[in-house]
């Protein structure tokens, strides 16, 4: 493949910060020209969704799960606040744990955290723990399946701190 074919096959959408390399796809050269109306409609529909257009007609509500990743896309201050305020409160709460402002009933500071994520929901926290290692004093433990032996093993290790 030469550079000209690559350059001619690169679809660029600078408003979205998005490019798509079609040079190694088995599609006709006329693809972009033929698909342009559908591409423009898809981008217009996306913009309408981001602006809060009702997308779920049966429930008469907006669909904005992507606002969780970027609250600035939320269509109004009320929704933006419903996203940012809980995050702020969680961060504030979490910052009080290592200092002992939030402490175990027996006093001192928390040393362990037990993350229960059966069905795959522990995978993200496990990845972060594996990738970053121990960055602080709180050790993570995971219940990521229903194996009673694994649970017993973890509980034996942290059990003395549960009193």
Image (cartoon, rainbow, N blue to C red):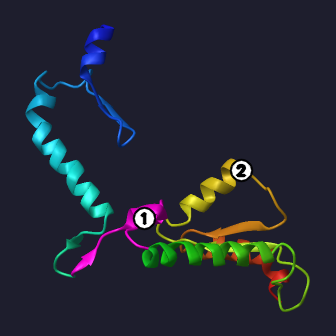
> Could you tell me residue 40's position as x and y percent?
18, 44
Residue 111 appears anywhere in the view = yes
Give the labeled residue for mark 1: 67
Q: Is residue 48 above or below residue 88?
A: above
Quarter of the figure with the C terminus: bottom right
> Could you tell me residue 113's position as x and y percent?
72, 73
> Could you tell me residue 92's position as x and y percent?
72, 75
Of residues 35 and 159, the one nearer the viewer is: 35
Q: Is residue 135 above or below residue 150?
A: above
Tell me what residue is drawn at x 35 percent, y 68 percent. Answer: 64
- Secondary structure under tag 2 reads helix
Tell me what residue is drawn at x 31 percent, y 64 percent. Answer: 51
Tell me what residue is drawn at x 40 percent, y 39 percent. Answer: 17
Name the residue furthest top. 2
| Displayed quadrant of residue 93 | bottom right
> Could you tell me residue 136's position as x and y percent?
82, 61
Marks 2 and 1, Cα distance to the nearest angstrom?
Answer: 27 Å
Of residues 109 and 8, the one nearer the viewer is: 8
Position of 25 with respect to 18 (left or right) is: left
Residue 149 appears anywhere in the view = no
Position of 10 with respect to 131 (left or right) is: left
- Secondary structure under tag 1 reads helix
The part of the chain drawn in magenta is: 60-76
Decide whether residue 56 is among the magenta residues: no
């Amino acid at each position: 493949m030469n550079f000209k074919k690559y350059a001619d096959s690169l679809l660029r959408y600078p408003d979205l910060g998005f490019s798509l390399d079609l040079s190694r796809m088995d599609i006709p050269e006329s693809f972009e020209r033929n698909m342009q109306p559908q591409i423009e409609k898809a981008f217009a529909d996306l913009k309408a969704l981001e602006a809060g257009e009702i997308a779920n007609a049966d429930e008469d509500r907006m669909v904005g799960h992507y606002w969780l990743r970027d609250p600035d896309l939320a269509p109004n201050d009320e929704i933006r606040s419903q996203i940012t305020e809980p995050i702020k409160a969680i961060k504030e709460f979490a910052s009080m744990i290592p200092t002992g402002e939030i402490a175990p009933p027996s006093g001192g500071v928390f040393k362990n955290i037990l993350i229960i994520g059966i069905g795959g929901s522990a995978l993200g926290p496990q990845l972060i723990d594996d990738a970053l290692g121990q960055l602080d004093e709180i050790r993570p433990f995971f219940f990521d399946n229903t194996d009673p032996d694994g649970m017993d093993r973890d509980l034996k290790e942290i059990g003395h701190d549960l009193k």
